Image (cartoon, grey):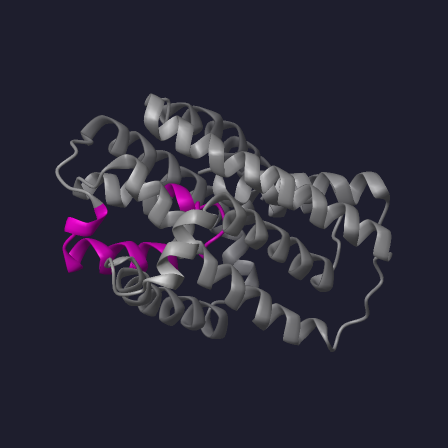
Amino acid sequence: MTVLQSLFLGLLQGFTEFLPVSSSGHLMLAESLFDINGGLFFDVMLHLGTLLAVLIALRHTVWQTIRHPMASKKLLFLTVASIPTFAIALLVKLFVPEYIMRYALPFGFASTIVLIVLSDRLYKQRFRLEQAGWGSIVVTGITQGIAVLPGLSRSGSTISVMKLFGMNGSDAAEFSFLLSVPVILASAVVEGWEALHAVIATPWYCVAIGVTAAFLSGLVSVYMVMRAIKTKSWIWFAVYLIVPFVISLIIL
């Protein structure tokens, strides 16, 4: 792997992890179009870079939740929503073959487009996160679990679902990012365990460059989404997704 390739993959991972455009889908397209793959260890390190990005971006909320776990419902909501997410992700990993995941790519992109458009057009704020019902929290967790399918954006689908329920847009985005923390951490642990038995062929300086790029671009993407939610420019992400959707149809 070259320095430019590691920089490219780091930027791609960081931006697409939190923008509603699907990191898994974009990485799959990049591997097919440019024939580059950093290996399992490199992927794990990129995940840790994006994990650090969301922790830094939401450091005040994270710190308050840790210091006063019973002061709000956030920690409880995160726990409840994570249960169906992990259950679905485990079932997919155990029983869904890799080649089927690849062929789900166009469907994932199309589903993300539909969810973003619907949430943009039908959105009517009715409550804040603290007032959310258990149904909306569980459905959000289920949605995040289904988003293990490539092309289906984790952030895009969860934020859209919460907006369709009527949750405040900024609260929905923040909760989606917080909900990514246990998912990214669990993914890093599982892939890290597998990486222990794999050959690490990527040079250390390429890993460092990729992680740094993932961290910095992840920070930018978190703030971009928060700003987009407030300025109501959410729909442009759906317009952009038409491009990878078409590309995925061509390369399959």
Q: Which residue is found at the position 25% from the left and 60% from the top? A: 71
The answer to whether residue 225 is left or right of residue 69 is right
In front of the other: 15 or 246: 15
Q: Which residue is found at the position 37% from the left and 55% from the top? A: 64
The answer to whether residue 195 is left or right of residue 244 is right
In front of the other: 131 or 249: 131
- Give the answer, above or below, for where 193 lies relative to 126: below
How far across and down, in percent of the image, does residue 30 sit?
67, 42
The answer to whether residue 164 is left or right of residue 213 is left
Q: Which residue is found at the position 81% from the left and 70% from the top? A: 199
How far across and down, in percent of the image, does residue 124 sit?
16, 31
Question: Is residue 51 visible from the viewing direction of this image?
Answer: yes
Q: In which quarter of the image is residue 251?
A: top right
How far across and down, in percent of the image, does residue 181 sit?
47, 58
Tell me if residue 53 is in the magenta stretch.
Answer: no
The answer to whether residue 64 is left or right of residue 12 is left
Q: Which residue is found at the position 30% from the left and 43% from the top? A: 172
Q: Give the range drawn in magenta.
A: 129-156
Question: Is residue 154 visible from the viewing direction of this image?
Answer: no
Quadrant location of the C terminus in the rendered image: top right
Tell me if residue 144 is in the magenta stretch.
Answer: yes
How far across and down, in percent of the image, does residue 88 sit?
37, 67
